[in-house]
Amino acid sequence: MVVQTGSQETQIPFKEIDWFRLTVNQGNKRTWLPFILCATVGTTAFIAASATEELQSTYLPMAAALTIGLGFGGYYAGRALDREEITYKVK
């Protein structure tokens, strides 16, 4: 059997294969999950931060950091939800 990774090919005898794992990335949760998190929690944080007049210069950057953090965290959480690993055992 020939396995290709990138531009390199490796030959593996069938007798040496006990199992193999297939990883599939399906869906679009990594796209819409960050959008939903940023749209709901981030907008609420910006509204709450702009409502406070005395500490607005402190709360607005914190709300921006929270929104950006939710975006990145939502992307990686959605990517993990999109990923499916299937392990096959060869008999």
Image (cartoon, helix red, strand yellow):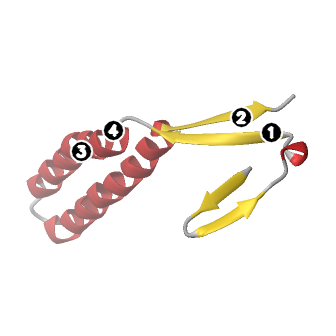
Dot placed on the residue nearer the N-terminal end, 2 or 3: 3
User: Three-letter amino acid code at disc 4?
Assistant: Asn
Q: Which mark is residue 87?
A: 2
Q: Which residue is mark 1?
A: 19
Of marks 2 and 4, the one in the foreground:
2
Q: Which residue is mark 3?
A: 35
Separation of disc 2 and disc 1 at Cα? 7 Å
Q: Please state which of residues 87 and 77 is positioned toward the viewer in this rendering.
A: 87
Q: Please state which of residues 69 and 4 is positioned toward the viewer in this rendering.
A: 4
Separation of disc 1 and disc 3 at Cα? 38 Å
Q: Secondary structure at mark 4?
A: loop
Q: Which residue is mark 4?
A: 28
Q: Residues within 10 Å of mark 3 (few under 14, many from 20)?
A: some
Provide residue 49's location: percent of width, then percent of height: 17, 56
Separation of disc 1 and disc 4 at Cα? 29 Å
User: Three-letter amino acid code at disc 1?
Assistant: Trp
Say left or right for 67 vs 22. Answer: left
Separation of disc 2 and disc 4 at Cα? 23 Å
From this viewpoint, which residue is outermost toward the top?
91
Callout 2 touching callout 1 (CB < 8 Å):
yes
Which residue is found at the position 16% from the left and 71% from the top? 57
Dot placed on the residue nearer the N-terminal end, 3 or 4: 4
User: Three-letter amino acid code at disc 2?
Assistant: Thr
Say left or right for 21 vs 83. Answer: right
Say left or right for 82 vs 9. Answer: left
Provide residue 50's location: percent of width, then percent of height: 10, 57
Separation of disc 3 and disc 4 at Cα? 11 Å
Which residue is found at the position 23% from the left and 69% from the top? 58
Q: Secondary structure at mark 1?
A: strand
Callout 1 touching callout 3 (CB < 8 Å):
no
